[in-house]
Amino acid sequence: MTFAMGGMAFWMPRYVFKDRGWGTKADVNLIFGAIVVVAGLSATLLGGWVGDKLKPRFPGSYFIVSGAAMFLGFPMVLLVLWTPFPFAWVFVFLAVFCLTFNTGPTNTILANVTHPSVRASAFAMNILIIHLLGDAVSPSIIGLIIGYANMTTGFLAVSFTVLIAGVLWWWGARYLERDTARVTLGK
C-alpha cells in the first residue's frame, strides 16, 4: 500500500496537470494536498473506529478492514485514470481515503502482536521498512515505466500492489487472535 501511495503521491500532481491537462500547477497542488490531508486523516480515524467496532464479531477485524479498504481502493485508482477532470477529483479523494483507511487498524495490529518491551522498536522497524520498500522506491519505478510507456501505464502497474496488499491483509486475519494471545500470555 505504501508502495502505491508513495509513487502516486509523487507523480499525481504532474499527471493531472501535464498528462490530463487540467488546471494550473498551483491549483492541482492545492487540491491534491487538501485531499490527502482530509481523506488521510478522516480515513485513519474511521478505519481504527470500524476495526474496533467489528472486533467483537470478527477477531481478525483489523486485517479484514484493511483488506476491504484495499479491495475498494483498487477500482478507485482505476477510475482516477479514466474519468475526466475535474470529476476525477472525486475518485482521487476516494482512492486516498481507501488507501489510508488501514493506517489505524494496522497500527493497532502492530501494537497488539508485539511485546511491550520491543513495541517501540517494532514500530520503528515498520516505519523504516514501509518507507524503504514503499515511497522511497516507487516514484523511481513509476518513472522507469513512464520512460518506456506513459504515466497512466505507470499508475496502472503500481495499482496492482493495492490488490496484493488486500490479499495479504485478508490472509493475516486468521492469525491475529492467536498472535495477540501469545503476546498477552507472554509466549
Image (cartoon, rainbow, N blue to C red):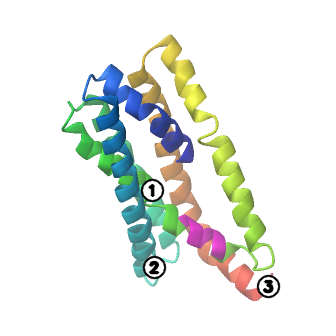
Secondary structure beneath dot 2 equals helix
Task: Please name the residue that numbered disc 1 is placed on.
Answer: 100
The quarter of the image holding the C terminus is: bottom right
Please tell me which of labels 2 and 1 falls first in the chain.
Answer: 2
Part of the protein shown in magenta: 106-111
Nearest to the observer: residue 29 or residue 142: 29
Q: CA distance from mark 3 to mark 2?
A: 23 Å
Q: Which residue is mark 3?
A: 186
Instruction: Give above or below for 174 relative to 145.
Output: below
How many numbered marks does the figure carry?
3
Image location of residue 174, percent across then percent down: 57, 68
Q: Which amino acid is tagged 2?
A: Asp
Query: In the displayed structure, does residue 19 sit left or right of residue 67?
Result: left
Give neighbour class at mark 2: few <14, some 14-19, many 20+ (Cα, 10 Å). some
Badge 3, how many Cα within 10 Å: few under 14, some, many 20+?
A: few
Which x, y percent locates residue 42?
Answer: 37, 65
Check disc 3 and give the amino acid type.
Answer: Gly
Relative to 182, does residue 32 appear above or below in the rendering? above
- Foreground tag (1 vs 3): 1
Does residue 102 show up?
Answer: yes
